[in-house]
Amino acid sequence: MTCDEAEILLHALIDGELDAGHAREVESHIVSCRRCTAALADYRKMSEAVAGANLRYAAPPGLRKRIEASLPQPKLPEGRPAPSRRSVLRGFAMGSAVSALAATGLVAVVLRNDDEQRIESEVVSAHLRSLQAGHLTDVISTDQHTVKPWFNGKLDVSPPVIDLTAQGFTLVGGRLDYLDARAIGAVVYRRRQHIINLFVAQTASTERKAASMENLQGFNVRRWSQQGMNFWAVSDIGADELNEFGAKFEAALGSSS
């Protein structure tokens, strides 16, 4: 196991998320590697500091009184009782709900008119979620023959898993994710210290669609369609490197069919 491979798994080791085999591999590597031993110690100190910190914030007791005092007090005809605080809050909540429904209807129209941009925003959000500790992979392996079978039975169509390590893109593993309210496969690669998420979804069309590149929230998104599947590769690496990754994946997938 190399340092780059071990570094990916250190957080999972601390959180107890590795299976026995991978845990033994990482622990064996740490014994003989000062760099990874130091990194593991730093991660553990950070985890303990966060767990021990009192990060809970309690609102001051006077906040409720100030909110109640700021609520409008309508003028009522003589003899009519003033509405209770509960009824005022209920009316406010109903008004907010109606506004939310109206806004949702408006958003739905906008999304239908710009579906591709919405999907690309979703894959960037999914990429960001995956970078949180413990969210990157459901199956951890650099072996494509381990990652691909893991998807079997979990999706209607398993995503293709191609080992591009020799081309400079290390296979890390895979996971289930969600896009457009559907479960899809995400195959994870690493380029130096950068993560590439490759999202794969089945499509009804078998027409090949040429790649396009977009930049959203500082992340590059390369999209293309091939063999009845839509692909979105997302990463913070440069557009040229992400395009290189996509081109190599396309070529390898085409030659394997």
Image: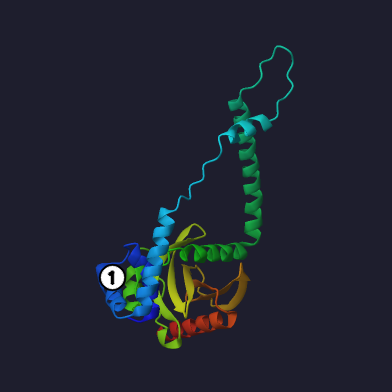
* Coloring scheme used: rainbow
Residue 83, percent from left and from top: 64, 22
Q: Image height check: is 121 above or below 71?
A: below
Who is closer to the viewer here, 5 or 95? 5
Residue 91, percent from left and from top: 63, 31
Q: Is residue 188 visible in this depiction of the protein?
A: yes
Reading the image, the residue beneath label 1 is: 23
- The quadrant holding residue 4 is bottom left
Residue 47, percent from left and from top: 40, 61
71 vs 186, left or right, is right
142 vs 243, left or right, is left
- The quadrant holding residue 208 is bottom right
The residue sitting at the top extreme is 79
Who is closer to the viewer here, 252 or 86? 86
Q: Residues within 10 Å of mark 1 (few under 14, many from 20)?
A: some
Q: In the rendered structure, which amino acid carries the disc numbered 1?
A: Ala
Quarter of the image where the C terminus is located: bottom left
Residue at point 43%, 72% (across, down): 187
Residue at point 39%, 64% (across, down): 45
Q: Image height check: is 49 above or below 229?
A: above
Who is closer to the viewer here, 204 or 115? 115
SS for dot 1: helix
Quarter of the image where the N terminus is located: bottom left
Residue at point 46%, 50% (across, down): 54
142 vs 102, left or right, is left
254 vs 108, left or right, is left
Q: Image height check: is 198 above or below 102?
A: below
Q: Is residue 156 visible in this depiction of the protein?
A: no
